[in-house]
Amino acid sequence: MKKNNYKSTLKSLGIAVGAACLLTACTKNFENINTNPYDYSEEELAKDFRYLGDPLVQVINNVYSVDPVWVAQVQQNLNADVYSGYMMSPTPFAGNVNNLNYSFIDGWNTNIWSVPYTNIMPPSKFVIDRAYGKFNDFYAWAKILRVLGMHRVSDIYGPIIYSHYGEINEDGSITYDTQEEVYDAFFADLSEAIDTLTAFENRGAVKAFTQFDKVYGGSYKKWVQFANTLRLRLAIRISKVAPAKAKEQGEAALTHPFGLLADGATDNTLVDIAPLQHPLNVYSGSWGDIRMGAPMESFLVGYNDPRISIYFDTAKSIIGGVYKGIRNGIAISSKDTYAGFSALKPVESKVQLMTAAEAWFLKAEAALYDWANAGNAQEDYEKGILASFTQHGLVANYADYIADNSSKPLPYNDPQNPGNNVAIGNANLSTITIAWNEGASQAEKLERIITQKWIATFPEGCEAWAEFRRTRYPKLFPVVVNNSNGAIPTEQFVRRISYPSSEYSTNKSAVEKAVASLGGPDTGGTPLWWDIN
Amino acid sequence: MYACCTVGLVLALQLAVLGPASAAAKSQEDISVSIQVKNKNIEDVFATLSAKTGLSFHYDKSECNVKQKITLNCVNEPLEEVLYQLSTQTGLKFTRKNNKIIVRLPGIAGNNALKSVTLDGKGSLVINVKGTVKDAKGSPIPGVTVMVKGTNNGTQTGPGGTYSLQANVGEILVFRSMGYNIKEAIIPTSGLVDVVLEDNVKALSEFVVTALGIQKKSKELTYATQQLNGDELSKVKDANVINSLAGKAAGVTITRSASGIGGSARVVLRGNKSTRENQPLYIIDGVPMANFSPAQPTDVWGQANGIAVTGGRDGGDGISNINPDDIETINILKGASAAALYGSQAANGVIIITTKKGKSGRVRIDVSSDFTVESVMKLPELQYKYGQTEKPGATPGTPESWGEVVNAPNHVDDFFNKGNTWNNSISLSGGSEKAQTYFSYSNTNNKGILPSSEFKRHTLNFRESLRLLNDKLTVDANITFVNQKSHNRLSPGIYYNPLPGLYLFPRGQDFDDYATHFEGFVPSRNFDLQRWWNIDYSNPDADNWRGRDDQQNPYWVLYRTASDDNRDRAMTSITAKYQLTDWLNVQARGSFDKSYDQYELKANAGTQIVIAPANGRYINEKERNTQLYADLIFNLNKKLSENWRIGATVGTSITDTKMHDRNMVGVNQNASPGLEYANKFSIANIQANALDAQHSIQRRQLQALFGSVQVGLKDYLFLDLTGRNDWSSTFAFTPTMSSGFFYYSAGITNVISDMLSLPSFINFAKIRASYAQVGNDIAPYSSRPGQFSQQILSGVGRVTFNTRTPLPGIYMKPEKNESFEIGFETRMFDDKVNLDFTYYVNNNFNQYMEVPAPVGSGYTIYYLNLGNIRNHGVEAMLTLTPLRTNNFRWNSSFNFAANRNKIVKLSDPDVPGASPSNMFTLTQFGVNMYGSFIREGGSWGDIYANRELAYNDEGQLLVKLNSQTNRYEPVINTLSQEPKKVGNPNPDFMLGWNNSFDYKDLSVSFLIDGRFGGKVMSVTQSVLDAYGVSKVTANARDNGGVPVNAFDVENDKAVSSLDPRDYYFNVGGRAGIGELYMYDATSIRLRELAISYKLPLKAKWLRDVRLGIIGRNLFFFKCDAPFDPELSMGTGNGLQGIDVFGLPATRSLGVNLKVGF
């Protein structure tokens, strides 16, 4: 009996040890268990080029971030869209001490930085690395989209991480490009991409990215035209600070055989985001967080501009029936005070990143500088207006509009607070008219071009704000309440956004060098490299 | 590969089950024994009996002559008879308590101090004294020693608890039995002395269940544990049984979700230790129980599970599924030393629940029924005097109430109902010698204080214990089913919550109208949509009448945006134990736990436009949680020599979990119109462009090899060593995968009172010390996250590039939790004073940390392990019996705990981003005022603010003139770069005071407990202030302004008063000034009150009838915060110590009835 017990003890012990050994040998299955079955690997996405196409869809959908909606709201709407004079919020966010009156909220501005570095740089680098030498059309497309996404970031901050992206220094930092360097890199990227896609188009290659391209349906030619226009946009941007380089790059764009975007009906860069709603509809519509800006009212009403009814609704209740904008950076005690002012007209599910009209206005400005192949300034200016009217189905109104040489922007009245009024004679109230005047000064011509470009570019506040800083046109109304504690002089307007605190914690030495290259403190008051007003 | 592990274990399990014969622990049932021995040592006889019955014999070797020879010839005789024979041969006394037999020398009289009774001098009056001894539940207790005080005259009670002896009238009888308090009674002339012995809580915990279900004598433990018996927990029940621990155990902090009855609870033992998981492991009858919460709110809005713009959802938790009446005992292993054998799951301590088993013999039926009524205990202080700022007209007017005096009626108090809760349970226990059955059913039925909210739960439990193969094999199987339904469990937060609308309703408008007509016919749509003071779908000027996302008609929220949270769960386990020799057994266990949760939100068309599209919003979320567990353990217990004893355990286990296997299908809030047909809530009715879908699962497998050794010297010095190696699948793709991670514990205890001769008032004294190191694994997939992830938002399904990764160049490591504790325990003055004191220090290294990657690296977040979070503190328990007479008894116990937490280090100079200023985010600010971060130098749970008032050097508040109003407003600094720490919700110390009074059949008990120190934030108050509906704003208006010592820099002017609106509107709101809304979290409350009376019914079939009055959370002795600081918006790591329109605290009062048949 006892002997038996010992035997079975030994037997059981043996089994236990056996089981234990089996257990320890069984960690092989761990890799399978510890792989998320619902995530994707590169191999799983290789079919149908999805590993090259899907990341680029992510890129283009995040130039202006379309989802979640609140991200776009803080990425662009509550800064650039307002700083451009296009819009203003009736909502006193954070007790009405926020970006809109020059008190930067880091929690908002972080998104201006993190959205591109999460959704533009990583996926475009992934495609550039994978496609190089194998699928050069994807490679070139990725480069164009990367410039499109990142020049906006540079135009907000100045120096950014671009050509040294992914290169980690000994001290763990990643070097910034100065804004001049990054513009050089943009031009190099665009030039290479334009050459590549031009060759694809010329040899009639089968379009490879049609299923991913929600803008031009995979047309190589259209993307070359777009890249030419983008190249001209960047060239014009640096025309004051680096005239020679600007001319060289601008002329390269102007002389390319495929030309620029031109037709207001077909060439606009509109990203089809259906079935998503345009975020503007959400924050103007259901959220009631954005309204017409006072300058828009002043110009569009003053010019009897027919685009006003395309862009905005009339105001509700308090001052019903008329178009009424809100002045930037004012005291707001309650959302109700201004919520009834003009809301934005709902737009279709297309995010406008560039227009054919802009191409013409860029060309018009190039013509002012006598760049080769820029054509005649007046002709370009009027074609720009035509392209915009075409875009909005208003061709019938075009002839009267360009002939109007008397309408001027109106003074601004705030029915809720006369302290916000901008009276006739105020230096910030423009007196520029519509019709081209060949005899006008170079400055007046520029103001006319930029003012019309500003109207045509709506609602793309990022580009409009950059051009305002470069040219100081159109004339906008300064903020009434300035919470920057002196960092941003009111009459100078906000000139950039400061780096997010995360850069100081993760990339300190590099961001400090970048700030040094800025030539001023890391505040909203320090002008960018190309902003030499 | 997978199969090989399971086959190995299953094989082992089967062999263990099918092998020949064994013994098992048994409860207090009638056992029959066959034993034939001739001239054997009594010690051997005990061992044989122990093997046959599963009972263990406990005796003091110094007292007992273990070599005494015995001869027995019993065939299937009752155990009592066998013991009686033993008693006759040895003179020893045997007392049975559950599965323990206490062996004592006869005639050791206690020096029980009772006032001496003087006889009346009429000399000796010897009579026949008899009676019955019963326990508190009315069951007779056999084997009680009955002695005439001061003499050697005595006897023992028989099987029916009866006794008889000869003694003098007026003499004192002393009744003593292990596990009960000593009782004395004067012999009356009638000679009839029936007594009821009360459980001695201290003695009950003499034997405690420790890690892996190993029972140990509490005196041998090298660490602190605390045991509570089921009666204490079920006396005043809570729908979530774990809430009943509050105030009763030192070092246990329980925070309840502000979602109402049946909501989840956060349990933290000895402080928060980790950036990841801080709640303890639950073990039920030896096997781990999954305690996952399907959802917790993650921000001030209340959003959960990454579904944008929804109401907060408290998905409940696993522990609340247990029926309190099924619990025999709860054991709390607070420190890592106690829990080390459980390995990485137990780094935060373990709560061991032992459930009831069937008992052989007569069938016992226990019925218990509680009915309680809940009422609101603490509401925010509101004002009804001042009306809406701008009255409605063409527009709805303003949402704020800063207008003229209107003296509106109080519409808030009547909104809340009296809630009521039924708790019914019935249990049945019985069986034969070979097979015992326990069956129970319970239901909880609650109607909440929130109109329409309901909670229902059914629990069914069936347990079978078998003894097979000549009693060598015991098999114990258990299955539990739970069905739980909760309708409209409150969503704390701003969205989908009736309370913001209720509290903020502009004063002066007609609330009753909106209450009775919360919806109205809209001709353009031909059905009813929401009506609220600022929501009117029939108004052509629609823009002004679409309302605000921060409030809706509360009745609409309740009746037209209903939420349902249902759970079905099955837990089953089987244990087989085989006695290989009298010193070695093998045990195999397996368990399977699966729960299925479904959550639905059905928001009708007409719900405010920001949070639901025009045709309504539907969310359907399903989650499964599955856990498989198996282990195989060898237990050895051998006496090596007279002085040395050794115990050892070797085992292996596997736990396979599929957590949060979740799919969500819903309507995107921004889609239009969302649903194809309005108000039809089905997945097929979701429009293609509105479809949101998510799919996720967390898989983890843990394998372990473990062992422990305990060495005992002379029963007063014990050394305990444990070691365990874990292999966790979460370390796949790292070197830790194949090596696993090893940790260990070592402890020593010395029972001083058994070693030295101490003053006689000290009955017991021991000291203990232990050290442990426990690892903890990491989150699934974090060692190598997927390259791309996918989800569908608004009908678009795209992959996105993953930019989160372990820091390049490192491998993820386990957390390393090092703890040390030292303790002292003593019982004095006849056990009337018991004190247990512990000091512990716990350092948790290698915290899982997320640091922002330099974005230029290609990543946005790096994972790594670094830093150290330290907790240290003291726990003390003091149990007193201040008064004890024949009929009256007062027990009083205190428990005290103080914990200090410090984030010693959470940085690494070599890692960019991991600087000391870097923070681990528990709750992000977003656009609101509350943020909580773990940051070096701070403490876990610190609350931060992102805005502050500006002051000049003289301490004057800075103000500026508002150009619109031409009045002064405070100047506010935003702290976006450097948020400001404004408090920490964790208490400085906690004190519980439990009292019970017994007078004959009446017993009264109450529990007062307090949390002292700590600060909590009320976003509710901040919002109420900004809207001008809080009482303070009315007071300020009554007083003509907010007095300030302020200064206007621009105009160089001092300002002494601010307009209340200008002040509160600027400092309040959901993005208010955090500092001003921090409140002392000190709260002292009468947590429990129970009065029960045992009805003097006498019927053969009726064992016991007890009627009681019970109360819970009756009132605060002190509470300065505007809400119950013990409630929190969520029970996850974030949102601790914050109230955002949570359900008000309730008091409950009711009756209960317990009947035993």
Image (spheres, grey):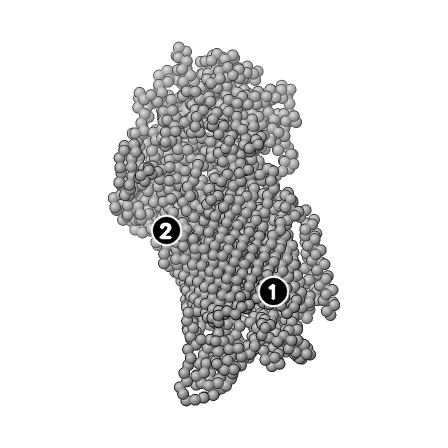
| Residue B542, image x, y percentages | 38, 37
| Residue B302, image x, y percentages | 45, 46
Q: Residues within 10 Å of mark 1 (few under 14, many from 20)?
A: many
Q: Is residue A143 left or right of residue A463?
A: right
Q: Which circle marks residue B1122 in the picture?
A: 2
Asked if residue B448 shows in the view, the reply is no
Q: Residues within 10 Å of mark 2 (few under 14, many from 20)?
A: many
Asked if residue B731 shows in the view, the reply is yes
* B665 vs A220: above or below: below
Q: Residue at x 30, y 49 (%)?
A: B384
| Residue B802, image x, y percentages | 57, 37
* B45 vs B721: above or below: below
Q: Nearer the viewer, residue B377 or B338?
A: B338
Q: Which residue is mark 1?
A: B712
Chain where mark 1 sits: B
Q: Kindly state the secondary structure of the residue where label 2 is placed.
A: loop
Name the amino acid type tagged 1: Gly
Name the amino acid type tagged 2: Pro
Q: Residue at x 50, y 38 (%)?
A: B915
Q: Is residue B66 left or right of residue B548?
A: right
Q: Confirm or deny contact between disc 1 and disc 2 (CB under 8 A).
A: no
